[in-house]
Image: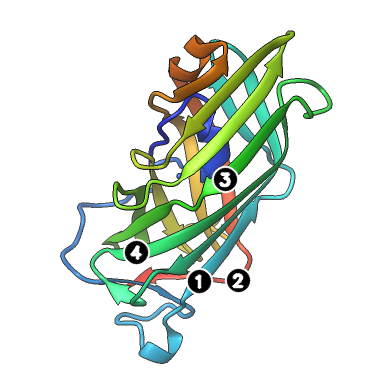
Amino acid sequence: MRLAKTFGIVALAALTAMTVLGAGSASAESTALCSTHEEPCEVANQVEGVHLELVKGTVAQMLSGIATVLCLDVLIEGQSAEETLSDPLELDVLLEFNGCGSNAAHSNCSIKVLEKPGFLLLKTALNLGELGGYSAQPGVVNVQCTIIGFQVNCDLNAEELGFPVEGAGHTEGAGNGMIVAHEVPTGAAEPLGGLEFACSESSEMDLLLEALDPIYVTS
């Protein structure tokens, strides 16, 4: 899934949204997050929310022509907006980013979510899915950095963000279920001051998030 700002990839990632994990063509089935590996997912096992954090020993990384920004702590919580089974599944997303910066102390960048973004999860194959932002609830993420004495201040949104999703146990390294970003491109950002060109320069994100509890992508 694809962020709309230079530093947005670190945040979203989305926070914030992964290496392509073998997802096939999108299915016409409804999508559910399920606590067990079953198809279809029984109502009692349909999960309303999921909590993901950075895999231990990894960092979120945003690469751009300006700097490499790292975040030591990224949290994503997704909550079903209405139904727990739909096509696609609509999620409200809470994002938190801490310990972000381009310096050794990871202290010269601040990433704050001003408006929660929404995401759509679509099952693409057995225990695989695609998670992406959508225009009805793009959210607003503010990123501010001081890099070599220069200020960067950008507002980002998740409307164009897109990631593959792998359910628990799908591959040997999938753990409880993962979102993996590898060289995911970002779009343009809205500059609010400082080095305005830094907000629109192309960048890429690397990110590895794992669910705290086993989660499966079913229907």
Q: Amino acid at mark 1?
A: Gly
Asked which secondary structure carries label 4, the reply is strand
User: CA separation, marks 3 and 1?
Assistant: 19 Å
Q: Earlier in the sequence, mark 3 or mark 2?
A: 3
Q: Which numbered dot is residue 90?
A: 4
Q: Amino acid at mark 4?
A: Glu
Asked which secondary structure carries label 1, the reply is strand
Q: Are marks 2 and 1 in contact (CB under 8 Å)?
A: no
Asked which secondary structure carries label 2, the reply is loop
Q: Are marks 3 and 1 in contact (CB under 8 Å)?
A: no
In this figure, which residue is indicated by the disc labeled 2? 213
User: CA separation, marks 4 and 2?
Assistant: 20 Å
Relative depth, front residue between 150 and 107: 150
User: CA separation, marks 3 and 2?
Assistant: 25 Å
Q: Residue furthest front?
A: 192
In this figure, which residue is indicated by the disc labeled 1? 49
Q: Earlier in the sequence, mark 2 or mark 1?
A: 1
